[in-house]
Image (cartoon, rainbow, N blue to C red):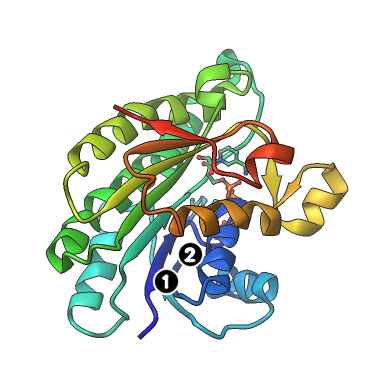
């Protein structure tokens, strides 16, 4: 029976890579999608819907992922052993003065809270299953340190202590928690070619390597340089 990866933010530049990595390593995917149009984007990128179950949910709400897990527990959706989370928001360089309250809250909701909810409401399920191969992985951005794009940077900065705590809390559990810290731009393949950045399909290799590296746990996987860090995991312990 193949393992299943629950992917939250599955239709984004980064989430698409996670779906591809899961499928390429022989796993199935339970993809949380916003709409059917988002699901179609996912199938188009992958080239098939084989191995992918989609579930529509509003990941910005603090009950959506709990609802997905409830459906898994009820046997209406496939059981999962791994979680990948990369819900995104605006990638813009507006100065602080130009950020309205509404945009600040919207982005904190999508880039911080949604990833927090994804963890809080799936970790209990993974612990209960007690599968020794389980993993929980999040993608964060180096903007959180650089703050060149202050709106996404503030949300990423908030994710860092969350990752440190989650790494510590799972040090002795069955769940291998890791943070993938990305310092260069990754976009869905066609956009990446147009903008001269790294393709989602190339970035997929990182998750493939991480899934195959049981020794990497409670760690930050650094993606500083696409030429080097997409070939070999560059990682260090969070705590
Ligand atoms: N891309 C990069 O180079 C990069 C670099 C550093 C860090 N990161 C990290 O990775 C995260 C994801 O980045 P990304 O480039 O993949 O972002 P993205 O392409 O904007 O995708 C974000 C995902 O979140 C979903 N989403 C966004 N807003 C939503 C909303 N209001 N309601 C429901 N779903 C929503 C999107 O769904 P739809 O497809 O339906 O819109 C998509 O699945 C970022 O927040 C950041 O933490 C990315």
N-terminal of the pair, mark 1 or mark 2, is: 2
Residue that extends furthest to the left in the rendered view of this protein: 128
Sort mark 2 into few (<14), some (14-19) or many (20+) by Cα contacts within 10 Å. Answer: some
Q: Is mark 2 within 8 Å of ligand 1?
A: yes
- Quick check: 187 left or right of 49? right
- Which quadrant holds residue 170? top left
Number of the label disc, if any, that sits on residue 168: none
Q: Report the disc number at residue 34.
A: 2
Count of labels shown? Answer: 2
Using the image, determine if residue 175 lies above or below residue 79: above
Q: Judge whether residue 105 can be spotted in this image.
A: no
Q: Quadrant of the N terminus?
A: bottom left
Is 143 left, or right, of 63 in this rendering?
right
Q: Position of residue 168 (x, y in %)?
A: 22, 35
Asked if 41 appears above or below 154 in the picture, the reply is below
Residue 203 placement, left or right of 10? right
Q: Secondary structure at mark 1?
A: strand
Name the quarter where the C terminus is drawn. top left
Q: Position of residue 72 (x, y in %)?
A: 25, 76
Q: Give x and y (percent) for residue 11.
A: 56, 62
Q: What whole-number distance in Å separates the C-alpha atoms at marks 1 and 2?
A: 6 Å
Q: Residue at x 44, y 58 (%)?
A: 211
Asked whether 33 or 219 is in front, the reply is: 219
In the rendered image, the vertical position of residue 13 relative to residue 171, given as above or below: below
Residue at 62 percent across and 16 percent down: it is 95
Q: Which mark is residue 56?
A: 1
């Amino acid at each position: 029976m193949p393992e299943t990866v629950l992917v939250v933010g599955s239709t984004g530049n980064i989430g698409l890579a996670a779906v591809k990595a899961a499928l390429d390593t022989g796993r199935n995917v339970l993809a949380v999608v916003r709409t059917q149009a988002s699901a179609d984007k996912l199938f188009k990128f992958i080239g098939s819907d084989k191995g992918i179950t989609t579930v529509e949910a509003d990941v910005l709400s603090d009950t959506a992922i709990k609802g997905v897990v409830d459906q898994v527990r009820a046997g209406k959706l496939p059981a999962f052993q791994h979680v990948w989370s990369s819900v995104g928001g605006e990638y813009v360089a507006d100065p602080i003065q130009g950020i309205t309250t509404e945009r600040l809250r919207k982005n904190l909701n999508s880039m911080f809270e949604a990833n927090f909810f994804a963890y809080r409401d799936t970790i209990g399920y993974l612990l209960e299953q007690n599968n020794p191969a389980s993993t929980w992985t999040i993608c964060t951005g180096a903007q959180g340190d650089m703050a060149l794009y202050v709106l996404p940077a503030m949300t990423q900065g908030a994710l860092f202590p969350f990752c440190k705590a989650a790494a510590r809390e799972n040090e002795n559990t069955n769940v291998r928690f890791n943070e993938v810290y990305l310092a260069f731009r990754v976009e869905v393949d066609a956009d990446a070619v147009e903008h001269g950045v790294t393709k989602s399909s190339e970035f997929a290799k990182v998750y493939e390597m991480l899934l195959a590296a049981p020794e990497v746990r409670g760690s930050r996987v650094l993606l500083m340089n696409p030429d080097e860090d997409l070939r070999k995991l560059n990682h260090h312990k969070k705590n």
